[in-house]
Amino acid sequence: MSLSNTKQTKKLPIYQQITEYLSREISSGRWLAGDRLPIEAELAANLGVAIGTLRKALAKLEEDGLIERRQGSGTYVSRAPDGKPVYGFFHLELLEGGGAPSANTLIAEQRDVTFLASTFPGGSVWSIRRERMLNRRLVAMEEIFFNAAHVRSLKVDDLHESLYLHYETQFGFWISKVEDQIDCAKAPTWVCEALGFPAGTVLPRVQRWSWSNEDKVEEFSYTWFDPNKARYIARWR
């Protein structure tokens, strides 16, 4: 068994986190073509970033043709992005709305998980435990499982902050669809401790099955989130 517990996950630059977040929000239908985005000062304050960082993100979106900045009027959505943004399947947001997602990987551990034996050979998986933040505020804890056959040795600092991006660049597949099941359950002790709840607290939980572009289940995950800080949201258009 290989075990790592250092926090050295490969991070997206902050401006790219903001770019991906805004792209996701446009893709999900929060802002439609023709809608005006909040003014820069308000948007930067809501995201907890400097105006300069926000403008760098907006410049990238404008370069990609997703937004248009009109002098004296504001910033408007031009179109939805092609394909899926990095956080396209991410469905948590702050109670007040929005929030740029980021993550810290805590542990990468290889083990056998009985209930996954029919999905992955013998249930042999890598278990990844992570903190999930919105605007750098801790709102959730995740445990993610994928087939141990993909890699023999794995350390925290091998992993990208976006596991979906890691799968694409390192394992040669990408996640094309997911199924979420939402319930409430007693959270594990490590989750309660991290989120500041008494042991055995019942918390909202998202169980997710993820399929690759080859229509094969490649990941199963649990996400427990703090309902005082975040909510699960899905939008269609």
Image (cartoon, rainbow, N blue to C red):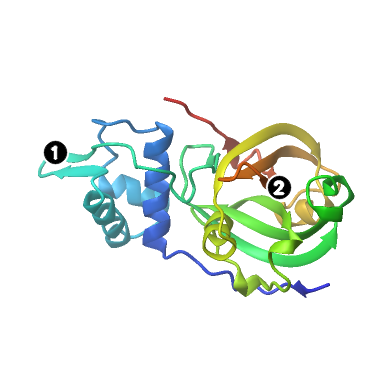
- Residue 203 against residue 102 in the figure, above or below: above
Q: From the viewer's perspective, is 198 left or right of 215?
A: right
Q: Residue furthest front?
A: 214
Q: Tag on residue 222?
A: none
Kind of residue at disc 2: Ser
- Residue 23 against residue 128 in the figure, above or below: above
Which quarter of the rendering shows the C terminus?
top left
Q: Residue furthest right?
A: 114
Q: Tag on residue 221?
A: 2
Residue 186 lies in quadrant: top right
Callout 1: few (<14), some (14-19), or many (20+) C-alpha neighbours within 10 Å? few
- Residue 56 against residue 227 in the figure, above or below: below
Q: Position of residue 46 (x, y in %)?
A: 40, 47
Q: CA distance from mark 1 to mark 2?
A: 43 Å
The residue labelled by disc 1 is 73
Q: Residue furthest top?
A: 237
